[in-house]
Amino acid sequence: MADQQENNLITRSDNYNDHDRNGISKPTFADGQLSFIGRDATVIPPELIQDYCKITKRLDLSYNSLESTAGLEHFKFLRELILDNNELSDDITFPNLRELHTLTLNKNRLTDLNSLIDKLASKCPNLTYLSLLGNQACPNQLSSCDKDDEDYQRYRYYVLYKLPKLKFLDSTPVAPSEVAEAKRVGPFMVVVRPKDSDPEDALSTEVPGSPKYSPLPADISEDRDKDHQGFWGKNKSKYLGLNSEGNRFITDGIL
């Protein structure tokens, strides 16, 4: 039954003009792989869901303008999902995709790594390949020039700790030694995001409501500061170093 439906859809796709009856650009479908690339879609088209959700194992929606993943819940048999180069942000949601083993989200608008990984661990527990390159949530030089290799390695430990079945993360295979280290240090690699606030307030160490700190004695007033007197001159004292065991080899000529 499924094979007959797939053959009918292949024929239907081949018979499409450049656009179907609703003005949606035609997709490409073959051998369970559905591609709908570079169509500037902000959502997954309903027609795409209706026609292909039951027979698609690999779905490529890259180079669109997707702001939502609504509709993915109908693709029950997905094993690979490509969502690169879209407009997906931290409010992204995932349905239960137990068979999904490959997910790429490169170059989107993802910033909150903790939230994203928690969603994936819950909804896509069998992932073996994940790529988040080009997002702020992935701290490497592709997302920010002020990140270094140590930042990226801490990120890898945390992701591997939360998603222990991963065999490939971003552009690098997962090494057995990396998995062992992730188990040990992963819980401590969680990224803490500061709350949105004034940058100057973030640098301040003062406790709200506390008196302003001053290193000067409390009885010194501004009037006394004005009466302060000092002197300028040349110090003529001479250090002999007689009582310093550490300086016994320093002569007066060196000082």
Image (cartoon, rainbow, N blue to C red):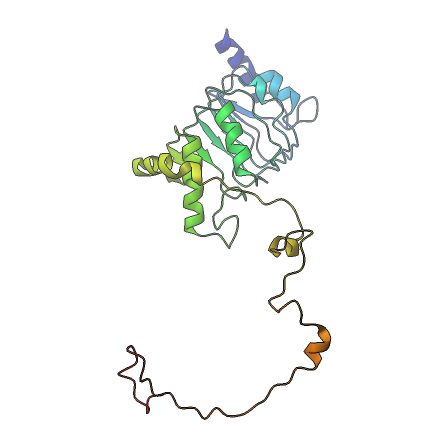
Name, please, the residue furthest toward the right: 223
Tell me the residue at 64%/52% (across/down). Answer: 207
Could you say where residue 75 lies in the image, as x and y percent from the top left? 55, 19
Tell me the residue at 50%/42% (across/down). Answer: 191
Vertical side of 253 occupied by 68: above or below: above
Judge from the rendering whether residue 138 lies leftward or rightward of residue 228; answer left or right.
Answer: left
Tell me the residue at 67%/72% (across/down). Answer: 220
Which one is in front, 253 or 145?
253
Judge from the rendering whether residue 160 lies leftward or rightward of residue 21; answer left or right.
Answer: left
The quadrant of the image that shows the C terminus is bottom left
Vertical side of 59 occupied by 142: above or below: below
Vertical side of 121 occupied by 221: above or below: below
Confirm whether residue 159 shows in the render.
Answer: yes
> Hey, which quadrant is residue 241 in on the image?
bottom left
Could you say where residue 243 lies in the image, as x and y percent from the top left? 32, 81
Could you say where residue 37 lies in the image, as x and y percent from the top left? 57, 33
> Hey, which quadrant is residue 86 in on the image?
top right
Could you say where residue 64 lies in the image, as x and y percent from the top left? 61, 35
Judge from the rendering whether residue 175 lies leftward or rightward of residue 94; answer left or right.
Answer: left
Counting the numbered discs, the total is 0
Name, please, the residue furthest toward the left: 249
Confirm whether residue 170 shows in the render.
Answer: no
Name, please, the residue furthest toward the front: 219
